[in-house]
């Protein structure tokens, strides 16, 4: 914990109105300012029991500062929301998250909330019958931290093609579906095997080509090609401009590689960067230099896509998730999750709930 002032430790009583608050904590790229529980919008009305499973998942791999809470977290799994709420107030201190370089205004800093989901796609183990877009395992000549070939180079250079040959996991029919899978980082496939049978598998993130992520929606907006940069808008443009789809794909140089595993539990989410299963509506991706993995976080965001005031957990990250007040909301899987994730782009306020 890289704090200028260490967080309070030990059994400190919940500060009542008028009692002094703990000092501000500097955590990486963010500043945590202690506040009263009353500042958290909607704290008295959230269905905390819906978040408790996500908390028990975090306790599978807790950070040092949060591990001591886990025995109580498990014990309270079947407690009432009022009991859970009272325990949180007795054990945790809320801190408003602010950018480290931002002004000290005394009001919550506004950031950005986006959404992501786990795609569900049809695939084939072999190319043919319309399935021509490969998804790859990590190539043998990939070095972590060192840039590999760009997306365009992987499609055109003989040496890049050679490195990917034999690393194919499965093939998709739509290159934009493959791009979605690369952006989301994981997904579910219903694969038609060589013998004609089908089975469901999960592809999980295994690495990337260490190239920067570039938004294809931003590329289209900058060209004046579209005014709606949602995925439905991007797909509509692609259907109208099939001759430019390759150019669109190459505008994002980043490639992701995958590992395959059986989909043993269809009700379980993919594993995030913390190494635990994500929970729809209760897991977020954050910048771990601002909020450590496993941290309980109070999230407030209101916009056209959703009105959210709830307990969530920092269990994942992403290449585009950078900064203090920045989060990606895990919407789950299926068409409703895809629709929400595609539309979610709105203002955000965050409070971390840290042990006293």
Image (tube, rainbow, N blue to C red):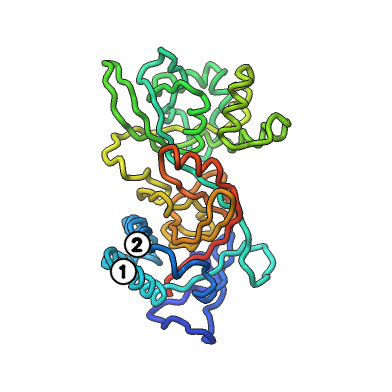
Q: Which residue is mark 1?
A: 80
Q: Quadrant of residue 68?
A: bottom left
| Vertical side of 213 occupied by 26: above or below | below
Q: Nearer the viewer, residue 247 or 346?
A: 346
Question: Disc 2 designates what residue?
Answer: 49
* Residue furthest out toward the bottom: 18
Between residue 72 and residue 209, name the one nearer to us.
72
Question: Which residue lies at the image location 51% right of the left edge and 57% below the top edge?
Answer: 308
Q: Residues within 10 Å of mark 2 (few under 14, many from 20)?
A: some
Instruction: Please name the residue shown 51% across and 37% down the image.
Output: 183
Local SS, label 1: loop
The label on residue 188 is none
Query: Which quarter of the figure has residue 104?
Result: bottom right
10 Å crowding of disc 1: few (<14), some (14-19), many (20+)? few
Rendered residue at 54%/64% (across/down): 27
* Label located before the other in sequence (2 or 1): 2
Residue 106 in the figure: left or right of residue 318: right
| Image quadrant assignment for residue 101 | bottom right
Question: Which quadrant: the C terminus?
Answer: bottom left
Q: Position of residue 348 (x, y in %)?
A: 58, 57
Q: Position of residue 185 (x, y in %)?
A: 46, 38
Q: Give the answer, above or below, for where 13 lies relative to 330.
A: below
**Where residue 272 appears, x then y in whole percent?**
41, 47
Tell me how far mark 2 sits from mark 1, CA to CA: 7 Å
Q: State whether residue 243 is above or below residue 9.
A: above
User: As rendered, which of 92 and 160 lies closer to the eye?
Assistant: 92
Numbered circles on residues, count:
2
Q: Are marks 2 and 1 in contact (CB under 8 Å)?
A: yes
> Can you give x and y, in whole percent of width and height, for residue 90 in the image?
39, 77
């Amino acid at each position: 914990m890289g704090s200028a002032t260490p967080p309070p430790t030990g059994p400190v009583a919940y500060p009542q109105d008028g009692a002094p608050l703990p000092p501000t904590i500097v955590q990486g790229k963010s500043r945590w300012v202690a506040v009263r529980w009353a500042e958290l919008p909607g704290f008295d009305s959230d269905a905390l029991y819906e978040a408790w499973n996500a908390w028990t998942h975090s306790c599978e791999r807790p950070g040092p500062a949060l591990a001591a809470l886990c025995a109580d977290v498990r014990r309270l799994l079947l407690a009432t929301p009022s009991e859970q709420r009272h325990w949180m107030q007795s054990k945790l201190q809320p801190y408003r998250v602010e950018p480290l370089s931002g002004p000290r205004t005394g009001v919550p800093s506004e950031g950005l909330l986006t959404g992501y989901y786990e795609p569900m796609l049809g695939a084939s183990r072999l190319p043919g019958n319309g399935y021509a877009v490969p998804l790859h395992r990590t190539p043998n000549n990939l070095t972590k931290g060192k840039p590999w070939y760009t997306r365009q180079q992987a499609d055109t250079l003989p040496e890049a093609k050679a490195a990917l040959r034999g690393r194919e996991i499965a093939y998709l029919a739509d290159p934009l579906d493959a791009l979605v899978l690369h952006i989301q980082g994981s997904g579910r496939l219903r694969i038609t095997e060589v013998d004609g049978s089908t089975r469901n598998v999960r592809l999980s993130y295994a690495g990337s080509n260490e190239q920067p992520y570039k938004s294809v929606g931003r590329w289209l907006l900058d060209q004046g090609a579209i005014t709606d940069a949602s995925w439905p808008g991007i797909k509509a443009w692609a259907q109208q401009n099939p001759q430019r789809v390759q150019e669109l794909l190459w505008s994002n140089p980043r490639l992701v590689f995958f590992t395959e595993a059986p989909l043993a539990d269809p009700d379980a989410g993919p594993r995030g960067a913390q190494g635990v299963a994500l929970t729809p509506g209760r897991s977020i991706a954050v910048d771990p230099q601002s909020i450590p993995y496993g941290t309980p976080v109070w999230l407030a965001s209101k916009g056209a896509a959703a009105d959210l005031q709830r307990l969530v957990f920092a269990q994942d990250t992403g290449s585009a998730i950078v900064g203090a007040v920045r989060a990606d909301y895990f919407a789950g899987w299926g068409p409703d999750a895809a629709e929400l994730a595609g539309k979610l782009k709105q203002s955000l306020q965050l409070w971390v709930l840290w042990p006293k």
